[in-house]
Amino acid sequence: MDNFDELISSFDLNFFGTGSHKISFEKMVELINEDKAYILDVRSKEECSILNFSFANNIPVEQVPLHINELPKDKTIIIFCSGATRATIIYTYLQAKGFKNSRILLENIGDISNHFKPGFVLKNHKSFEN
């Protein structure tokens, strides 16, 4: 638990003020294009069956500990959910487990969907194919 205590203690004004724990959609796209990102959707299987983002890897929040060894340490893990609560929980969990290059996507699923207009899709569709 010492590691977790140290982690929580690091969440000070500087941490929140710099926003280094977050990442924009634009930066996510850049990392995807460079093959430096692993996109982690922590919504439930039921939510994903209704609205699926094929570029993301769905591991529901309660199953992340079971799949921790499948997550890459050499890529930025970008976490999202329907809002930010579950993404924040998993961000903190991954930080405690040594995944220092994890980030919370600033946008929620509605914001993500709004990016996928024809011009964006034409320019980026190959990057988002699994």
Image: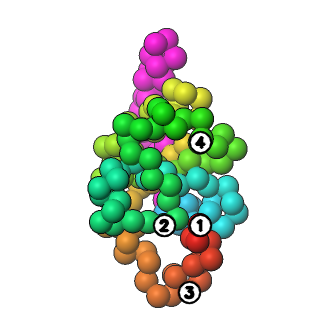
Front residue (pair 28, 86) = 86
- Circle 4 residues within 10 Å: few <14, some 14–19, many ≥20: some
The label on residue 71 is 4
Q: Earlier in the sequence, mark 4 or mark 1?
A: 4
Front residue (pair 8, 42) = 42
Left or right? Give the position of 40 relative to 89: right
Compared with 92, 113 (above or below) is: below
Q: Amino acid at mark 3?
A: Leu
What whole-number distance in Å separates the C-alpha atoms at marks 3 and 1? Answer: 16 Å
Left or right? Give the position of 107 relative to 67: left
Residue annotated with mark 2 = 54
Front residue (pair 68, 112) = 68
Q: Amino acid at mark 1?
A: Asn
Percent x, y for residue 8?
Answer: 43, 23
Q: Earlier in the sequence, mark 3 or mark 2?
A: 2
What whole-number distance in Å separates the C-alpha atoms at marks 4 and 1? Answer: 16 Å
Residue interval drawn in magenta: 1-24
Rendering quarter of residue 36: bottom right
What whole-number distance in Å separates the C-alpha atoms at marks 3 and 2? Answer: 16 Å
Q: Do the numbered discs 2 and 1 sit on residues whose CB atoms are within 8 Å?
A: yes
Residue at horizontal 51%, vertical 46%? 103
Residue annotated with mark 1 = 130
Q: Amino acid at mark 4?
A: Leu
Q: Earlier in the sequence, mark 3 or mark 1?
A: 3
Q: Is residue 61 visible?
A: yes
Front residue (pair 128, 95) = 128
Secondary-structure class at tag 4: loop
What whole-number distance in Å separates the C-alpha atoms at marks 4 and 3? Answer: 29 Å
Residue at horizontal 34%, vertical 43%? 86
Residue annotated with mark 3 = 122
